[in-house]
Amino acid sequence: MKHHYIPQFYLRPWLGEDRQLQEFKRGYRDRITTKRVFTKQTGYAIDLYTLPGVTEETKQNVEKFFMGFVDDSAVKARDMLLAGEIPTDANIRHSWARFLLSLVFRNPEEVAKFKRHFRETLLAPDAEFQRRYEAQRSEGDPELFEEWMEQQDPTHAERSAVLTLTRLMEHRNVLRLIKGMYWRVFDTSRMARNLVTSDRPVMMTNGLGRYDGHFAIPISPTKLFVAFTTKQCLDETAAKPLGTMVRAANDAAIGQAKKFIYGVDESQMTEMRKRVAKRDSPSFIRAS
């Protein structure tokens, strides 16, 4: 099943009259190819959040129900922001904050990294568990407790990792922080250069609670959403030239991209070739 880690509704503002957008795809040695695509043809991985070890009817529940709800509930907020209206309703702000947070976690690299980290943590040797296990171990059971766990359910670690990821996307403290930030949409329509987006569209500081903390994402070729920790940082950013802001946003979207970048046409191919994958993308998961 196709799991769109870059949701189709998010990409639609980049569509042209042909109902397609320009996809730039990173390949071998950072070679960039480009073509027109429909939203359903891009930004997905097969069975990315599939739950192993469950019934056929429930193995796609994370994609069908959780991710579907995250995306559907964010549409209203996105539409308001595109219209230049900053949501004040707590539920709408919550939905948008959760959507932004989900984009940091739900891509193939982060999912794979989290699964490895979760498995290593879950199956790490523990002296107390091992002592209790040895006291009850039956003849024929493996010597190590973690080997016994694997034997009982080889899919437990991966399934639990996927479910834990959904809970992280609803992390109460992080969502409260984003909801309480100063939100702003910058209109860049008078700039010659359009905003692009990518499979890593979120831009954020290393630590949202700092003075210059921010959480940003392009929401159309001419609209950039930014949430600021402080009003002073918002005012300082708003005083900067729009051209500088567009350049910084595009540098981040292109530089963080792993596989896909999106625009309205081919005109920014040179930027893609120079900057693709030159920056680290945001992550809340410790590398392993």
Image (tube, grey):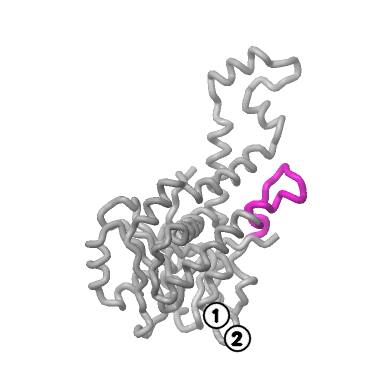
Q: Are marks 1 and 2 in contact (CB under 8 Å)?
A: yes
The amino acid pointed to by label 1 is Leu
In the image, which disc is placed on residue 106? none
185 on left or right of 38: left
Q: Is residue 4 above or below residue 186?
A: above
Q: Is residue 142 above or below residue 254?
A: above
In the image, which disc is placed on residue 15? 1
> Which one is in front, 120 or 229?
229
Asked which quadrant contains residue 280, the reply is bottom left
- Residue 281 seen: no
The answer to whether residue 252 is magenta is no
> Which one is in front, 81 or 281?
81
- Residue 219 seen: yes
Q: Position of residue 262 (x, y in %)?
A: 51, 74
- What range of the chain is rendered magenta? 45-64
10 on left or right of 228: right
Q: Position of residue 97 (x, y in %)?
A: 44, 58
Mark 2 burial class by Cα count in 10 Å: few <14, some 14-19, many 20+? few
Estimate the spatial distance between the alpha carbons at disc 1 and disc 2, rounded to whole Å.
7 Å
Mark 1 burial class by Cα count in 10 Å: few <14, some 14-19, many 20+? many
Look at 67% across and 14% down and name the residue there. Answer: 136
The amino acid pointed to by label 2 is Asp
Look at 59% across and 80% down and name the residue there. Answer: 20
The answer to whether residue 49 is magenta is yes
Please give the residue where the numbered disc 2 appears in the rendered image: 18
Q: Main secondary structure of the magenta part?
A: loop
Q: Secondary structure at mark 1?
A: loop
Asked which quadrant contains residue 80, the reply is bottom left
The extreme top residue here reads 135
